Image (tube, rainbow, N blue to C red):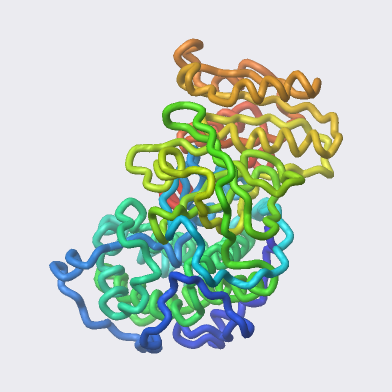
Amino acid sequence: MDAPTTTSADSGSGGGGGWFTPRKAPPAGASTDQEAPSEGRRVTPIRPVGRPERISDDHAETVPAQSAAPVAEAARAPQYASAAGTPPQPGPHAAARPHAAQHGQGPSPAHPPHSAPPAQAPAAPRAETTPRPAPAPEASPDARLIRRTLEEVGPDADKVTSYFYALLFVRHPELRPLFPASMDTQRDRLLKALLTAAEHADNKNVLVPYLKNLGRGHRKYGTQPEHYPAVGECLIGALTRYATTTWDQETEAAWVRTYTTISQVMIDAAAADELRAPAWWYGEVVSHDLRTSDIAVVTVRPDQPYPFLAGQYTSLETPWWPRIWRHYSFASAPRSDGLLSFHVKAVPAGWVSNALVHRARPGDVIRLGPPSGSMTVDHSSDSGLLCLGGGTGIAPIKALVEDVAEHGQRRPVEVFYGARTDHDLYDIDTMLRLQQTHPWLAVRPIVDQQAHLQLPDAVREYGPWNEYDAYLSGPPGMIRNGVDALRDIGIPVDRIRHDSVEELVATGN
């Protein structure tokens, strides 16, 4: 990940940014997203301390409480990890994040618009590793006030979310085009991301890298620095409305300082990223391999070089669902031909996943966001790799195996491939071929209905794993159980990697 400290993390609360007003604009030539509104009234500065006018509950319910596409890409991880992300909470899971990638709902016409963003030198891929958190210091005064607010509004989370979006779209209708036409399934992600970030404002070693990644990812939505004050204003408005017993001027000032810091880190990260990478890439589908009735391997050719690391993931938008993005892991290590492959499982009500599995064909054009993820291999170490992949979570595991092979290492790699039935072992032939080629690789299929043993429990039957780094990708439940099992058998949490963004966002873990 990026360095755990940043000047913007400290400057935002010092008053330089004012009331949610960005301290500085990004460099000239700011990125443009074809779907961003071309015109619209400027966002007015946030109101000074004081309760904003209220919108009636009835009115709030009539305004679609849409998802936070623009300011909360925190929410989405690969399919198996069902994806959506918030900053990891300090503690056991702070250094290990669940793996991400797969559920989709996406984009614009099957052909790119006539005006694509100018080609830029792609950013070098980053391995997003989080340093082991130091013992949590005593909470700051602002953090205590923020947590007090969160405790009060927690039982009314749905109402707070609805009211937040009602305020945002009524007061700032020019921002509505940044959001999908319908995003009921993830409408609360923006607010959850903001609240979770605020809650962990004291833990900058975890929070700052997360916010930087979030700021970079939001470029593809067309998010601009001037949009942040509007979001902050409506966040304060929603909290004011429901934190009726704990809200006062001191609390509001704490939230303003915290949000100003959060937004400034994201703005600075987006501005820096703009100098070295496009906001998004076009990718032409070159092959579509339907492995089962609901799983497809989709391979695309990006329109310009796309740097990434094995084990990472990206976000995809399809031509059939504009402004709806879902995260999917890369199913291979970087290839010499530049092609990118993804394993996609169609899930109920999964707009993007169903489009990619059942509608996409060679020649269709999708869009790709920047790469993300911390589930990468440390090639300076000779530790073995213990890999747990469930369902389509085997995709990034396969990429890790290829990555180890390409580096010519002989470190042992143990892969546990979990599935409910034999039918779900859709990529077992590929994994077994890799095992035949590389003597240091062992692949163990674990089928629940045959062994009556779930994947995490099967891992306990083997070992010891003291000298191994662990990697997990799959459904959120599998990741949770897997992390618990690995910790129970003595693997330190700083040697467990996973990237389940959506799970992190939904649970705050």
Q: Residue furthest top?
A: 450
**Point 25% across, 70% down: residue:** 166
Residue 109 pos. (x, y %): 43, 59
Residue 276 seen in render: yes
Quarter occupied by residue 387: top right
**Point 33% across, 51% down: residue:** 185
Residue 152 seen in render: no
> Where's the N terminus, which quadrant?
bottom right
303, above or below 480, in the image? below
351, above or below 398, in the image? below
Side of 174 where 100 appears, left or right: right
Q: Residue furthest left?
A: 58
**Point 43% across, 60% down: residue:** 108
Question: In the image shown, does 218 or 350 lie closer to the viewer?
Answer: 350
95, above or below 258, in the image? above
Residue 91 pos. (x, y %): 57, 48
**Point 81% across, 43% down: residue:** 379
Question: In the image shown, does 132 or 422 lie closer to the viewer?
Answer: 422
Quarter occupied by residue 304: bottom right
Residue 5 pos. (x, y %): 68, 68
Quarter occupied by residue 449: top left
Side of 318 where 245 appears, left or right: left
Residue 45 pos. (x, y %): 40, 88
